[in-house]
């Protein structure tokens, strides 16, 4: 019995020794460039946030963090590629509400947004704004509702596409206010904003970062925004909550994720550096001008938020009207 215990003890000591040696022999991460896939075309909020963070991470870790745009299927294509990648920290994705909460419910169930990903850090995002052309004779939600009810054929409104945050908020508003509103689905936020500027459509639900410059220029008017409170850079736009629609308090957020099973050491280092980047004064100023809000949280807290967002939005996504 004593001999067996000695053998176990020796075996354990050797095992621990080998484990320590193996751990010491492993190279530190990263030893080569890291890819960050943005599952949308260049130029949008996800792309901007991805590049902003990538620049900081490149400097912090001494290796290039290279952003690659791989759009398609509302973010599913690029995201699915990352889900199938090795969890070694060298392939990441700019995840978020659209690609990892809405699209999997609307799409082909190509991945499980919780089981197939490691969620690393919350990046933030802009609230959605209901905006009209300044020639439209309404200045607040109450006047907008009254205006829509006078239109015999309903009001046409645009969003960046079926299943986007703008579409979800628009449908919730239409339902709660009991309005006759005709949705026009676009491919991205720029086209509906352009049509609103040209009076080709009568209202839009888009991210504030997409319409903010035109609102500040006096070409569009913000009727209500989904932020929790009025924004310092857009003090004249009331929130939906103060306009009588407390349910419509949300943002179209983006985040950084990787394949399931990433080492906690890499996840925690990335989370720390992302939070450092978002706390820089020049970064905060840049984001604020676009109405983008951030929130500091560790990876565990963000993962809980991710799960709660899926739980909250899934019933609404499933209840969206089917469009031709």
Image (cartoon, rainbow, N blue to C red):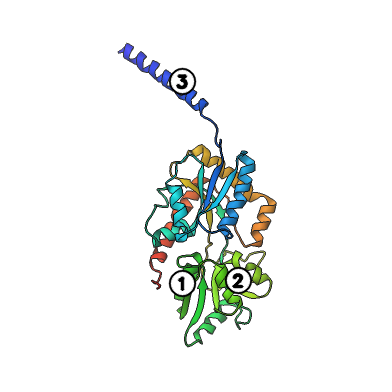
Placement of 231 over or under 140, stated as above or below: above
Q: Earlier in the sequence, mark 2 or mark 3?
A: 3
Residue 46 or residue 11, whichever sits in front: 46
Residue 169 or residue 28, whichever sits in front: 28
- Give the quadrant of residue 3: top left
- The answer for how far apart the CA atoms under marks 2 and 3 are is 63 Å
- The answer for how far apart the CA atoms under marks 1 and 2 are is 19 Å
Q: Earlier in the sequence, mark 1 or mark 3?
A: 3
Query: Does the rendering let one see residue 225?
Result: no
Q: Label 3: how many residues lie within 10 Å, few (<14), some (14-19) or many (20+)?
A: few
What secondary structure is found at the residue carrying circle 2?
loop
Q: Is residue 120 left or right of residue 317?
A: right
User: In the rendering, at what x and y percent does residue 108 appear?
Assistant: 37, 59
Placement of 88 over or under 17, stated as above or below: below
What secondary structure is found at the residue carrying circle 1?
helix
What residue sits 38% from the left and 68% below the top?
319
Q: Label 1: how many residues lie within 10 Å, few (<14), some (14-19) or many (20+)?
A: many
Read off the residue under disc 2.
Answer: 238
Look at discs 2 and 3 and give the one toward the viewer. Answer: 3
Q: Which mark is residue 1?
A: none
Read off the residue under disc 3.
Answer: 17
What residue sits 41% from the left and 66% below the top?
316
What secondary structure is found at the residue carrying circle 3?
helix
In the rendered view of the protein, which quadrant contains the N terminus? top left
**In this view, which residue lies farthest toward the left?**
1
């Amino acid at each position: 019995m004593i001999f067996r215990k000695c053998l176990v003890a020796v075996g354990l000591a050797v095992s621990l020794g080998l484990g320590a040696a193996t751990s010491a022999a492993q190279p530190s991460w990263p030893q080569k460039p890291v890819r960050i896939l943005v599952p949308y075309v260049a130029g949008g909020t996800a792309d901007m946030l991805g590049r902003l963070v990538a620049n900081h991470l490149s400097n912090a870790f001494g290796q290039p963090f290279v952003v690659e745009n791989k759009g398609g299927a509302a973010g599913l294509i690029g995201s699915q590629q990352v889900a199938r990648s090795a969890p070694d920290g060298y392939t990441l994705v700019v995840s978020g509400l659209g690609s990892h909460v809405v699209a999997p419910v609307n799409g082909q169930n190509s991945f499980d947004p919780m089981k197939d990903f490691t969620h690393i850090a919350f990046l933030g995002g802009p609230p959605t704004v209901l905006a009209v052309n300044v020639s439209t004779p309404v200045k607040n939600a109450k006047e907008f509702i009254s205006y829509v009810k006078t239109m015999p054929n309903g009001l046409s409104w645009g969003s960046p596409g079926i299943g986007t945050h703008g579409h979800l908020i628009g449908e919730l508003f239409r339902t709660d206010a009991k309005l006759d509103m005709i949705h026009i689905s676009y491919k991205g936020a720029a086209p509906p904003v352009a049509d609103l500027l040209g009076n080709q459509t009568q209202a839009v639900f888009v991210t504030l970062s997409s319409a903010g410059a035109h609102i500040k220029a006096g070409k569009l008017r913000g009727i209500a925004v989904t932020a929790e409170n009025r924004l310092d850079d857009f003090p004249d736009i009331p929130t939906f909550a103060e306009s009588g629609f407390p349910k419509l308090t949300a943002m179209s957020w983006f985040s950084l994720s990787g394949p399931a099973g990433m080492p906690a050491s890499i996840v925690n280092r990335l989370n720390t550096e992302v939070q450092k980047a978002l706390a820089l004064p020049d970064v905060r100023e840049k984001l604020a001008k676009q109405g983008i809000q951030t929130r500091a949280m560790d990876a565990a807290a963000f993962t809980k938020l991710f799960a709660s967002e899926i739980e909250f939005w899934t019933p609404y996504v499933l209840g969206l009207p089917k469009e031709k």
